[in-house]
Structures are given as structure tokens and as C-alpha cells.
Image (spheres, coloured by chain):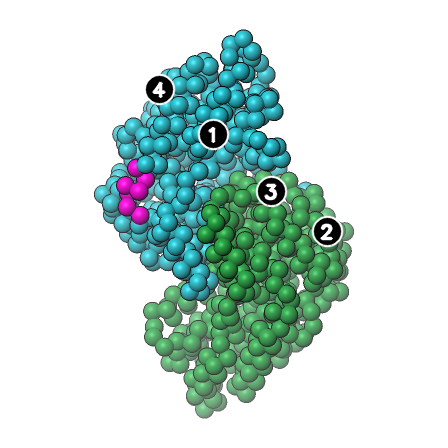
Chain colours: A green, B cyan
Amino acid sequence: MPSQRAMETTPFAAMDVLAKAERMDDVVHMEVGEPDFEPPAAATEAAIASLSNGGADYTNSRGKIELREAIREYYDRTYGVDVPTERIIATPGSSPALLVTMLDVVDPGEEVVLTDPYYAPYPNFVRQAEGRISTVDLDPAAGFEPRVQDFERAVDRDTAAVLINSPQNPTGAVMSGDSIEALAGLAERTDTRLISDEVYHGLDFDAPAHTALEYTDEAFVLDGVSKRYSMTGWRLGWMVVPPGEVTAVNNLVQNVLICAPNFVQDGATAAIRTEAHWLDDIRDTYRERRDILLEAAREWGIDMGYSPAGAYYLLLDVSDLPGDAFQIADRFLEEAGVALTPGPDFGELAEDTLRASFATSTADIEDAIERLDPLLSEQQMH
Amino acid sequence: MPSQRAMETTPFAAMDVLAKAERMDDVVHMEVGEPDFEPPAAATEAAIASLSNGGADYTNSRGKIELREAIREYYDRTYGVDVPTERIIATPGSSPALLVTMLDVVDPGEEVVLTDPYYAPYPNFVRQAEGRISTVDLDPAAGFEPRVQDFERAVDRDTAAVLINSPQNPTGAVMSGDSIEALAGLAERTDTRLISDEVYHGLDFDAPAHTALEYTDEAFVLDGVSKRYSMTGWRLGWMVVPPGEVTAVNNLVQNVLICAPNFVQDGATAAIRTEAHWLDDIRDTYRERRDILLEAAREWGIDMGYSPAGAYYLLLDVSDLPGDAFQIADRFLEEAGVALTPGPDFGELAEDTLRASFATSTADIEDAIERLDPLLSEQQMH
């Protein structure tokens, strides 16, 4: 019999929808965040060169120094903050980095404060460390921007950490620098940890996203190459660790992960060294897709009154449609051939929502809108 | 402050020795298990082809079906056992697979029975799941073969699992099929889990190593491409999971690991499909190195009266030399330029030992023996 924590670990419904959608023909995939762009050519070339030259050995458990230097330069260039390479640890994806963070930060029974909605797997990460979650509600009318006073109320003596994600999955909301700074201050005052998942950084459409590193050295910051460099399947993430946690975190990484793949690190190094303007066209395209999708949602009356300022997700309000979110997602998939993710995995406040990813091509998004239109015209489904 | 479990997680001394040795010039590296052979050419070619063709997307969290088919064929070809692909889950290295196994199998306070000596990180894996370890002693005079009755005595109502490793790190000992079969029976009788770490399979010099899958469907079996295909830095492992645990384990993997890197999976698929005789020369070379090293150890009087039947490690008894194992390892490094791993990390019974890896080249091993000879001749150090 699996352990209690394993039994309490819920499947990630996006993956289940993907599995079902994969068995069908002619489906527009808007259920996973899989960018349709190519990685920077330099990344692929560097990984191939590394492989050809025998880049097959273990590396330092923190990652190759060239990779960590590239990450340091990235923070300096992008945010003007200096992060010593000693505090940077590369991992096989940012998910294992979050797991290690939880194992490092959370003692059994302690609490991690999340926003609701949240990235679906977050509570499962907390469970692996035998922790509990507590949530602060996000309001679509406020653009899903968290209110600092809600976090202040939620943090108590059992709190180990506050976990934020900006730009956010599943809403696409981007937190203001002021909010992040206030949460960094809250964490320092209350002797808790701020954990900032910044994996969608670079994909911000209206104003630049801010890193917690601008405001504090005491946060855990998680990032990786998956999203902004369209390198999801490379599985290369990193964490920036508070100075006092470097030894403990490195012990964990060295024991349970060993290191990130050697030549993948070399490819990621090249990606991270790509000039920032490489992303401009991609960001513009995402913004355009957001606008197309948002306009359709408004016409159908299923928008939530906000516009995602980053990432590549839009949360849709389907509370007025017949059935629950799972049934509606099923119907969209079977009757229109459009795969969206049912909201309930993303928290109580997402219960009557679907998540649409606009990481798929503009043509596919336009196709999806045409396919859904007959179902969502007022005569049909309302 | 790090969590209790993080503070109790010990550094892996082999990595610390490596870090120190890396700062020195002219060192023979016998402290890490880094094969000096090349991966199968087909593996590198397949990974490059995959990268060139855009193999950069997420895969199924269990791994691509081609990889799982290759693993299934490997078990059929090598051991004559049929393992359905549904029970095979690819991971970014076998270490994350062991972490997921522990999270799936061990409830807080439960016990995992290990042999002593053990692979140094094992207790740290158990700690991540809030478990405790209990050990059964291995006797060098018995070739470090565990006695089944010792396990029978060690398993009690608090036991969640028995964890074995054959061929073993750090001794190189290979368990008999009878022993593994008896432990599989013990696990089934006592409603505990047998976890079999088989990552050194294929590197057996005297008689073939046996997989737990020959005797039971209810074991967790861990393996990967690191050792027998000399692909340590690729970080591709897998687990074979009991039928009743597939859903729970896949939930864990899908949440905290997402998937193994896409093109790495393609390279691993090609490696695993390599004909078994590809390994013959490599195995012969390891055997030859073992014999060279063992002969030197016997001449110096620091052998432990056994011969490693697999893997690429030899445990050396340094109890008669002045100082403790750390001091002796330091002296070997500084005075002879030979890096070996101090034994204490590998358990109480390895306290007065050093671990020598013969994954390094034959020429380097001969060089190391020449360098150590003046220190270990009876006049000098005894």
C-alpha cells in the first residue's frame, strides 16, 4: 500500500486530459503549456557540440560553473542584481528544485501559504515534506493580484513559507514589485521563507515581472529554461538559495539528484546567454494570442474580467454553462475537438473554470475559437 | 533555518573529496565512479538526431513508449522476464527514482532495512520520507553476501521496506539469486517492500547478477544507463513498480519530476538496445583492473579477504594504518596524489576503510599503485 502522502498526492489533471486528447484525432491542444516556438539555435548547437565532445560525465552537483556564471549574468543584465554563483544550484527542471526547497524548508506539520488559484501540483510538493497548505484568495476583479494584508493574516507560528508564482499559472497574473517586496519583508519579520517561482519570467506583456532577488537575499527563487526559451523537454531548472541555506540545499541535491545532465547544462548555458531581444517576437506573439483569446472569451461571456499580464494561460469562467468543469472540458474535447484543462486542480476558486493555454500556435487558437463558437453561442450551451 | 531532515542529511564525502582533488594538479581520481569508457555511439547519435529534429517537448511522465519498450526488451533478453511497459517509469537518473520510491513506500517513523556497508546516500533518502534506518551487518569473510536470517530478524512491524543493492556500492559484492529470492519471499510474507537497486547490473565479473524481477512482481527495481553504458552525466534512470503502485508512483513522478529530458530518453533508448556483447570488452577490462588493484591491496596487507564480483569498487581495510580513514585519505591525496573515498559514509562497518573505484583507466590505476607503494610499504606507514 502506498504511503499516506502518496495516497494524498493527486494526479495532475492537465496530464490526464493530455492522455485522453492524445488518443483522439484532430484535437487542438490548449491543455498543456507546451510552447510551439523553437529553442534558441545556439542552445541546440551547444548541446550537440557537448555531446559530440563526450560531455557525458557527472558534473559538480551545483552545476557547471559556466552555467552558473551565465545565470549570474542573466540576473545582472535583466534585473541589475548581483547573485553570487555560490547561491545558484542547477537542477533537472524547476520541479525537482521546488521539491528540494520544500524538503529543505518545511518540517512535518508546518504550513506553506499559497494563493488560490495556484499551480495544481503545489499542494503535492508540500505534502512530500509532510507539510500542510493554507491559502489566500485571489480576486479576478483585482486582476488576481494578491493582497499583502491577506498574507499577513495567513502567516502564523506554524508557517514555514509563503510560495508565490509570478507570472502565474493558471491565471497569467503578474505581481507588482511592491507586493513582492512587501512579502519579502513579511517573511523576514516573521522568520518564514519567501519562495518565488519565477519560471514564466520573460513572458510578461504589459509591465516587467520582478524577481524577489531585487528585494532580498533570503528568498528561494526558482526558475528554468522551459518557458521563456521554449525548452520544456530539456528539463533544466535552477534555484537561487539564501546564503545560510546553501550547504543544506547542496547536501540534498548531491544526495537525491546528483546533478543535472551534463550536455543539457551546456545547451542551457547557451540559451541563457541569448540576447534578451531574441524573446521580443515571441513575447509579441503571445500577447497577440492573448488578445485574440480574450476577445473570444468576452464575446462568449466566459471571461473573468481580467487580462493575463504574463505566462501563457487564460482562466475562463464556465459557471454559467451546464455541468461541472470536468464535464464541460469533456464536452469541448469530444464535441469540438478542443482540449482545455478543468480548473478544480488549481484551487477552490478555480472550481468553475477552465484553463486555456495560448502556448499553441495562433492558427490553432483561431481554429479552436471557430470550433467552440457553435457550442458557446448563447442558443446552444447556456 | 533548514528543516530537521535537511540538517540531518549528511554530505556525500565522495563529492567533497572530488571537490578538493579538483583543486589540485596531477591527481589520480579513484574517488568517484566515473567510467572512463565512451557511451555506445548509437546513444550519442540518437540524442543528437533527436535534438536536431526538435526533441524538446515534454514527454509522457512515465517516459516515451519507445524507451519503455526498449527497457522491456532488455529484461526479456537479459533475464527472460516479461515486464509490462505499464510498470516501467523513466526518471532523470536512478537517484530521483529512489527518492520517489521512498516517498511512495515509507510513512513517517517507518523503518527501511539496509545492509552495512551501504551506498552512502541511502540513509539520506530514507530521511527525506521521515523514515528511520536499521541495518544488517555484512561480513567481508563471507564476501559481503547478506545472510537472509539477518534480514528476517531485522524486519518487524515498523518495517516498510528492505533495500538491497547488487552488485553493491561500495563493496562490489554480488548477491546470489537464492538470497534475492528469499528476500522477495520475506517481503511478501511480512507485507513489506523489497527495493532492489540494480544500477550496476551488467558489470558482474564472476557470475551473472540477478534481478528481483525474476522472483517477484512486487519489488521496486531501480536501474539506469549510468554505469553499464558509461552514461553517468546523462542522468537517465528508471523504476519498475509493483502493479498496485503504478498509479501512486506515476502521480508522484508527474507532480514532482514532470518527465526525464526528451532527447536524453532517445539516447538512452539506443543505448539499451545495444547488443549485450558490446559490454564484453568493458566487463573484461573492469575485471582485469579489479585483479590488478586486488593484488596490490594484498601485497600491502590492506585487502579485506574478498574479491569484488561486480560494480567497480574495492573496499580497503586501513585500520592498521595510523590515523582515521579521513586522515589517511587526506594523506594519500596530498602525499601521493591519489584520491580515494573515506569509508565512514558507507556505514559503521566501513569506518576503517577506503573505497577505491576502478572506473578509472588501467594506466591510471597502475600509476596510483606506484604512487601509493612507497607510503604503503611496511617501513613507512604501518
Q: Which residue is mark 4?
A: B142
Which numbered disc covers residue A250?
A: 3
| Majority secondary structure of magenta residues | helix
| Image spot of residue A378 (x, y percent) | 48, 89
Can you tell which of label 2 and label 1 is closer to the viewer?
1
Label 1 vs label 4: CA separation?
30 Å
Q: Within 10 Å of the Cα at label 2, are there few (<14), some (14-19), or many (20+) other Cα atoms? A: some
Figure quadrant of residue B251: bottom left
Chain ID of residue with mark 4:
B
Task: Look at the image and tell me whether residue B321 can be seen.
Answer: yes
Image point (47%, 56%), residue name: A48
Write down the region rendered in magenta: B274-280
Q: Secondary structure at mark 3?
A: helix
Amino acid type shown at disc 4: Ala
**Which comes sooner in the sequence, label 1 or label 4?**
4
Amino acid type shown at disc 3: Asn
Label 2 vs label 1: CA separation?
44 Å
Chain ID of residue with mark 3:
A
Q: Which residue is mark 2?
A: A217
Figure quadrant of residue A13: bottom left
Label 1 vs label 3: CA separation?
30 Å
Q: Are marks 1 and 4 in contact (CB under 8 Å)?
A: no
